[in-house]
Amino acid sequence: MTTTTVTEREIREAVTMKEAIDAVRDGFIDLAGGMFEMPTRIALNDGQFLVMATRHRPTSSAMIKTLSVNFRRTPAITGIVVWSEAGRPDQLVADAGPVTALRTGAVVGVATDLLAAPQADRLTLIGAGGQAPDQVRAVHAVRPLRRLTVVDTDPRRARTLLQTLETELAGVDLDTATDADHAVSEADIVCCATPATQPLFQASALPARVHVNAIGAFRPTMRELPDDLLADSRVVIDELDAVLQESGEIIHALEAGAITQDSLAELGHALTGPPVPHGGRTVFKTVGVATQDWAVARLLADKFLH
Ligand SMILES: NC(=O)c1ccc[n+]([C@@H]2O[C@H](COP(=O)([O-])OP(=O)(O)OC[C@H]3O[C@@H](n4cnc5c(N)ncnc54)[C@H](O)[C@@H]3O)[C@@H](O)[C@H]2O)c1
């Protein structure tokens, strides 16, 4: 067995956020075009262990990822990504922590670029954990920021995040806050990245024109967004089968009758369909799909395997 192993430092040096955003955008366009074989992921013990797999038909390449998830541990998410191509016997194995953070940031970058107002430059981020830096980097890559406000139930984590990003965000006003309702009331873009089980803010606290990304909930019992926000917004999701199985907020809003399934637009179709009209509130809900990991793994294979 020949395996090339790629570490966190190598991943970070090899792939910029801009490259990840472009690769993930192309991946979702291919997904909409039926070019991926992608079963919904396996979740063991209610999401403590996850197994995700996909095959890209045109290139006969496959990505398989296993994750271990524990929010009482740092990092909360660990695992491995395995990249294989039908035509070659060797494989690439990459640290799934940074691949997951990069690809989750990247899909938020794709959605924010599609849905946020062109002049949007004030971001409120709720949840300052492992995913947070790449959420900010991705938004900043598509909508250069003037202000970043970070909310976390643990204020030390919010401050640590700002210290981590200080150099990359030179010239951006950086602030922490404890009142999520107030913090989102002054945002053009909101990113939610917590394992919360109740909505993080009230829909009425948001401005009339805002784009909200929610990455945190990945089990039916988890929820970051209120039903009335989903009812009142243009809602784009990563993939229908995945959110119907895993997104607590979509499942809750459907069961409450706040939204209907046909009001949900998949990202790949939104990217390839008629231009999305600007205005009002928009939401992007992602539970994370294997296409994203495939897209980043492909960039790594191009750099380390070929
Ligand atoms: N959609 C996806 O593709 C995707 C990918 C990776 C992670 N996730 C999910 O995103 C979430 C965050 O992941 P992470 O790795 O950053 O976790 P983490 O444990 O490193 O960080 C979570 C942060 O949220 C904060 N927090 C918890 N509840 C809060 C609340 N009610 N209000 C404000 N802050 C709160 C915690 O203090 C912590 O700082 C998890 O639920 C994870 O499963 C989703």
Image (cartoon, rainbow, N blue to C red):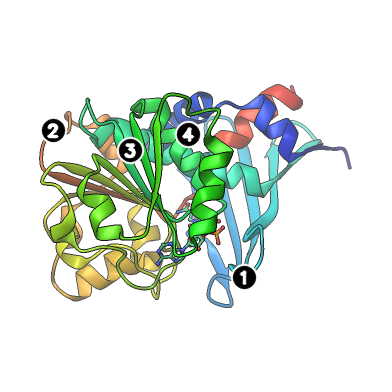
Q: Residue at x 14, y 47 (%)?
A: 207
Residue 293 visible in rendering: no
- How far apart marks 2 and 3 lie (CA) works out to 13 Å
Q: Check disc 4 and report the residue beneath it.
A: 137
Classify mark 3: helix, strand or loop: helix
- How far apart marks 4 and 1 lie (CA) works out to 25 Å
In this picture, residue 102 sits left or right of residue 79: left
Q: Check disc 2 and report the residue beneath it.
A: 278
Q: x%, y% of residue 182?
A: 24, 55
Q: Check disc 3 and report the residue beneath it.
A: 111
- How far apart marks 1 and 2 lie (CA) works out to 40 Å
Q: Quadrant of the C terminus?
A: top right
- How far apart marks 1 and 3 lie (CA) works out to 30 Å
255 is higher (above) or lower (below) than 3: below
**Tag in front: 1 or 2:** 1
Classify mark 2: helix, strand or loop: loop
Q: Which mark is residue 72?
A: 1
Q: x%, y% of residue 293?
A: 56, 43
Q: Residue at x 20, y 45 (%)?
A: 282
Answer whether labels 4 and 3 touch (C-beta < 8 Å): no
- Callout 1: few (<14), some (14-19), or many (20+) C-alpha neighbours within 10 Å? few
Answer whether labels 1 and 3 touch (C-beta < 8 Å): no
Three-letter residue code for mark 4: Arg
**Tag in front: 4 or 3:** 4
